Image (cartoon, grey):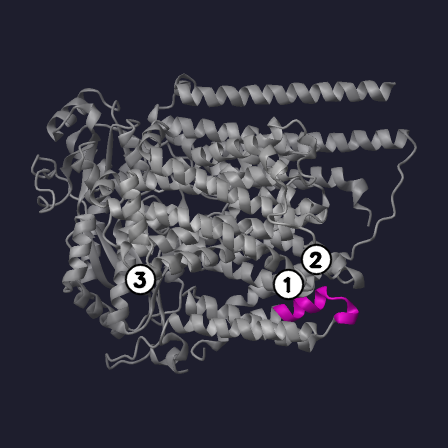
Amino acid sequence: MKLKKYEDWLTGAFFLAVTLVYASQIPLIKRTKISPVNSAFLPTIVAICMGALALVQLYMAFRNWKQAKAAGGTQEKAEDSPDYRRAVYTLATALIYVMLFKPLGFVLSSILYLTVQMSVMAPKEERRPLRFLLISVIAVAVIYLIFHNGLSLLLPGGVLTGIL
Amino acid sequence: MLESLATGAAAVCNPLGILLILLCTAAGIIFGSIPGLSATMAIALFLPVSYGMTPLMGMTMLVSVYIGGVSGGLISAILLKMPGTPSSVATCFDGYPLTQKGQGIKALGVGVFFSFLGTLFSIVALIAIAPNLATLALKFGDFEYFSIAVFSLTMIASLSSGSMVKGLLSGFLGVLLTTVGMAPIDAAARFTFGSTQMGAGLDILPVLIGMFALSEIMVTAETSAKKDRTQIVQVSTRGVKGFGFSVAEGLGQWWNALRSALIGLAIGILPGLGGSTSNLIAYTVAKNQSSYPEKFGTGIIDGVVATETANNASVGGALIPLLTLGIPGDMATAMLLGGLMIHGLQPGPLLFQEQPVLMYGIFIAMLLSNLVMLIEEFFGLRIFVSLLKTPKYILLPIIFVLCIVGAFGLNNRVFDTYVVIAFGLVGYIFIKLHLPVAPMIMGFVLGETVETYMRRALMNSKGSWMPFLTRPISGAFLAIAAFSVVYIIVKNVRAYRRQKQNNAL
Amino acid sequence: MKAKKLLALGLAGTMAAMCFAGCGSSASSLAPASSAGSAAQQGSGETNWPERGISLVVPFAAGGDTDYYARLYAKYLEEELGQTVTVVNTEGSGGTVGAQTVADAEPDGYTILFYHTGNLYANKMLGVSELDQNSFEIACIGEVDDTNTLCVRSSLRIDNAEDFIEAAKAEPDKYSCAVTISGFSYYTLCQLEDASGMSLNPVDAGGASAMIPALLGDQVDAGINSYGVFKQYVEDGSIIPLLTYGEERSEYFPDVPTAKELGYDCSAARAYFFGLPKGTDPAIAQKLSDAVEKIQENEEYTTNVSETYCVTPQFKPYGEALSYMDEIWAEMEPYTEIMNQ
């Protein structure tokens, strides 16, 4: 997927989308009179500026596209094509980890996360799930003991509450 | 005063004190260096441990953690492109490129050494002229804070390398994010979509972790599955003596360092602004005033010197209002305040007179901790670098778990961990679209300050905007801000015209 | 070879962690597995609670006065209850986020809220939150702070309340007063303005640490907060207290008249309470209340609080605490409209 060509368009679209969602919520803000300038003031300014800039960005994308067409197309360098799937898997793994954090508890969810994440990121040849599991258990144990027991940073017990 | 310092030194330099300084500075460095755990969090965790000790020993412990923590952030910023604490965000910008060029040790050495100088500068200011500086700081009211924040925001423009529009969009996104939650002053709910959790707003730490750490992990995941790419960039320690940079290089940075230290000190003194702001501002000022601004961001030591001197100078700076007026300069000092109060001591103008030994003892403890930090980090340089020999696919997930621990431990809510995930995605999008991250961070850090002080100031002036201009300090900052905006516009217009001319030829 | 290195590192780390854990908390890690069930249904009034570590939630950032009281209590509660008590700061929305977190928590007695009626009710009056004293099982009240004081900066050259109120009545909105708009101090300002007929210009100050520099630096004319916050500046003369909101003059600052003395029907107090999630076993609430009562009898504790904050520790036990809070709410509620202007 050649992102570079569409970069400017996507940037403009992204920010325009953000502006629209943001602006839609502004009317919901309670306007009190205690302060000369109410709580909707700054958001309105931000929405206007961001919207304007997003449109400028889209315009520039359009103009660059026209210029590029006139110049006879650009050369696309053959890049080392990154494996986007792994980035997505990484995000998904992290999300599931966070969702399981409280219900399963820190210890179990972290061990699960580490093992899966390491497997996702490692190259096929070096993927050794059992070794990862062992490393995960040790790492999680160390972290748990230092933070939960040593420094009183309470971490959710989840399923293991009362046992640990 | 020398006499008092000597008494203070005698009080601190006992076996327990020395041991505390050695251990706690190290603990602070470790906390600072792990993204997700910050100096503030370290102080919060060590606070209960300090109750059982005498006030001096307790404070020695806490300031050592503070100094170590603020400095430690540079390690992961330089080696992993993940700021260990919000105070080291700008260190990534030039620190990581240096590592990519194989000059990681040099970057680390520069960072450590100038961190030391920054703290030293601010501690000396603290000891020598604290009361005077504090009185000066009192002259800064809501109007002045607003103008300073506005001035800082205008510098966003210079942080956008490349497209100005993208930089501004990024900056506005940062400001937009600070408006999520309860509004300042009247607590009106904004953009909360009905959720109490969103009502609390977004904290800088989870946002930073997501934007820098998670997005970086995602990017690494794209290529880490290739066989020959599992190591993090090799940092060669062979042939590197001392701190990794030459005396000539160090001396060449003297003006950069001094200026950054002053910026850090000034921002630290102002309650409400701290290390997380000063490092960004110092970096931007350094870039603007340099004769080779285009090199910033490609990996030059100037960038690292500016940020690390500034954020460490803010440490001493933040302690000035705390110890002279009893007003904390930032979150970390607010906890130090709590630590003192639990011992029945109220910092303020009277404490200096009533407890000189304690006060000067704290100063000595800071000086010693600073020195210890320098030594520990110096010897630790090579250890940190060797930790990088762990394959990426093992190291990064473990770091992420620590990040989640930190995000969760911040307020004990799972919501903050979801923020990390969300901003991991945002950060990833930023990387893919080549959007600059620095303006967003700057907008985020300063957005709330701008709004809060603007509204408070207007309450004070009953709606009149005049005092912003007529009050000398405030007016000065706004004038400089206006001037720099005009200057940047003119510069860009000229460059644009020149480009058009070149195209026409 | 790489595996061995990692394993060695892991073992070393585990050993280090064990040492750490050793110097850390004591009983919490080895609790019996029955703790989840035992806390809930024990109608006999007896309970084994606590059997593991407790979280004391403070809905503000570390370093403030609520945090201070909580940490002091935590220290002594550990001795009384025999388990670790960890203060957890969950800040946001002037206290609402932390309070909501406890309201939503498991009613097993291991998550306790330490909060005060000042912000709890102010937030409800402003519509920020629906929470009030009935959203929790109120175990007891640990502190009552009735030392809110109106102070002015010394450069104003006014040293008594009557002169100030006269001057303020003569020129409405001329004098600025620093308060926390979405909080308790704003409520107290509204009360006084209503009773005396004067009108001050309210300026939001955020909290004590912003109010002090504002007064010292002559940015505002007056400020309202607990006396303890102003104490050292009163002593060195830079801030002048005019009147206080207690029912009677305080023994710590007997020179400051009360509003009632001067003929203004105002009094305001903040009660700091221990709250449990609704549905918690009453036996647990009783046990907590008894523990706090014991701490109040500890002289070390009372001296610490009174010296630091000029507040005499007050205690209201389980049951009575709820009615006390109802009383406070009855006093505060009528001002809802004024505050929302």
Mark 1 surroundings within 10 Å by alpha-carbon count, few (fewer than 14), some (14 through 19), many (20 or more): some
Mark 2 touches mark 1? (CB < 8 Å): yes
What chain does mark 2 sit on?
A: B
Residue under label 1: B395
Query: Where is C216 relative to B199, above or below?
Result: above
Residue A124 on the magenta segment: yes
Check the image and report above or below for A69 versus B312.
above
Same-chain check, marks 1 and 3: no
Q: Where is residue C274 in the image (x, y as percent from the top left)?
A: 27, 61
Return the residue nearer the eye: A149 or C176: A149
Report which residue position mark 3 lands on: C136
Q: What residue is at 44 percent from the left and 35 percent from the top? A: B265
> For the point 57% across and 30% down, which residue is it?
B285
Q: What chain does mark 3 sit on?
A: C
- Name the residue tied to disc 2: B232
Image quadrant where one finds the N terminus of chain B: top left
Task: Name the one closer to the observer, C260 or B130.
Answer: B130
Residue C163 lies in the magenta stretch: no
Q: How far apart are marks 1 and 3 (CA)?
A: 44 Å
Q: Which amino acid does label 2 sit on?
A: Ile
Whether labels 2 and 3 share one chain: no
* Disc 2 and disc 1 on one polypeptide chain: yes
